[in-house]
Amino acid sequence: MITPGQTIGIVGGGQLGRMLAQAAQTLGYRVAVFDPNPQCPAASVCHRFQPGAYEDAAALSGFAAGVDVLTYEFENIPAEALRGAGARVPLRPAAEVLHICQNRQREKAWLKAHHFPHAAYAEALDGDVRSAVSEVGLPCVVKTADFGYDGKGQMRVGDAAELDHAAAIFRGRRCVVERWVDFVCEISVIVAKGPEGEGRAFPVTENIHTRHILDLSIVPARVPPAAGRAAEALAIRIADALQVVGLLAVEMFLLPDGQVLVNELAPRPHNSGHWTLDGAETSQFEQHVRAICELPLGPVGLRGPIVMANILGEAWQGRPPRWNELLQMPEVKLHLYGKDEPRPGRKMGHFTVRARSAQAGIEQARRLQALL
Ligand code: AMP
């Protein structure tokens, strides 16, 4: 067990690292953060900050030597570099989990090998998008295997002209081509697992994306109860099969017939779990700390309907957003990540609205987004 007072090392110092550090400190842990950027959101809230490149295996090993347990807050860290660091201290989730989840080809192949439901797909070997598309059929989505997030590195292909375009853009890149899924809605389940295998799933979250970036998370998700239960059970089985220690976020598509397909896995806290800070009995960040430190997992109950809205750089428009309008409302909580440059599409913060129903929360969140 890693006890309060010992040090948690977090690789990556974005907003996920920042909120994780804050939760760890609430439980009395010391926190060290490794990130290339000394101005990253977590740098100002940790006990020790170490600047360094994610590819620098020696620097990561040195960092690991000074902590009692090591974790990470995003996927695009070379798993090999972390594997070396993980030889010194417990790395949670393990490097193998990261290795699978950080590459779409491996992730899809793993889902397929373990018979978890996912959209039909083909690998575009040697960047040969055309033959993969002919295997899958139109419409489809071409996605790069590595380093994609928030819809970056992907393109929908619906006809021959778009296929020509995609074939040119993705030439020579490792890709997967996925059949287009006409989903009813997108949902996610965040599961926490301790080292002894005990696991708990947060309630199913419904997610609305705008221009490929998460816009709203809605809880309880407006899905049939049976589909919700199936999604939770599926997420737990995936976390079991991957032998995750810590959090695993499972993003899924709900189909019109009630079937659930897995879209993506993330072995870390997740944007679609930010509502847990204000709306669950335990936050996802605290739960991750509890899991990786071998503490008892916390209760995951919902405190009432809640909606989370991301605040992107666009909200600035030459002046700061109207925070006071938000802060006047007792049912609203504001979380800002301390980033100084509000670029379009950049996640600057989020707010949550607690309401009498999911629908009322959505309407209030939309009003507040317009008002900001
Ligand atoms: P991803 O980066 O895989 O999470 O994809 C980003 C977003 O693109 C998803 O949240 C969906 O809204 C959409 N998307 C991804 N794959 C598909 C698909 N096979 N069919 C329909 N929409 C998709």
Image (spheres, rainbow, N blue to C red):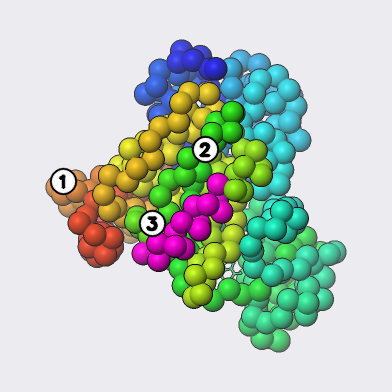
- Say few, some or many: other residues with alpha carbon within 10 Å of mark 1 (under 14 / 14 to 19 / 20 or more): few
Total numbered labels: 3
Determine which of the numbered discs, if any, sits on residue 217 in the image: 3
- Say few, some or many: other residues with alpha carbon within 10 Å of mark 2 (under 14 / 14 to 19 / 20 or more): many
Q: Depth check: give the residue in front, 333 or 108.
A: 108
Determine which of the numbered discs, if any, sits on residue 232 in the image: none
Q: Is residue 226 visible?
A: yes
Q: In 3D space, how far apart are the residues under numbered discs 3 and 2 (Cα atoms)?
A: 23 Å
Residue picked out by circle 1: 330
Q: Amino acid at mark 3?
A: Ser
Relative horizontal placement of residue 126, taking residue 10 as reference (left or right): right
Q: Depth check: give the residue in front, 280 or 128.
A: 280
Select label 1 or label 2 by which is in front: 2
Relative horizontal placement of residue 325, taking residue 113 as reference (left or right): left
Say if 60 sits above or below 80 in the image.
above
Q: Amino acid at mark 2?
A: Gly
Is disc 2 placed on a helix, strand or loop? strand
Determine which of the numbered discs, if any, sits on residue 199 in the image: 2
Residue at x-position 59% and y-position 18%: 67
Q: Earlier in the sequence, mark 1 or mark 2?
A: 2
Residue range corresponding to the magenta coloring: 222-236
Say if 27 sits above or below 133 in the image.
above
Q: Earlier in the sequence, mark 3 or mark 2?
A: 2
Is disc 1 placed on a helix, strand or loop? loop
Q: Main secondary structure of the magenta part?
A: helix
Q: Position of residue 24 (x, y in %)?
A: 44, 25
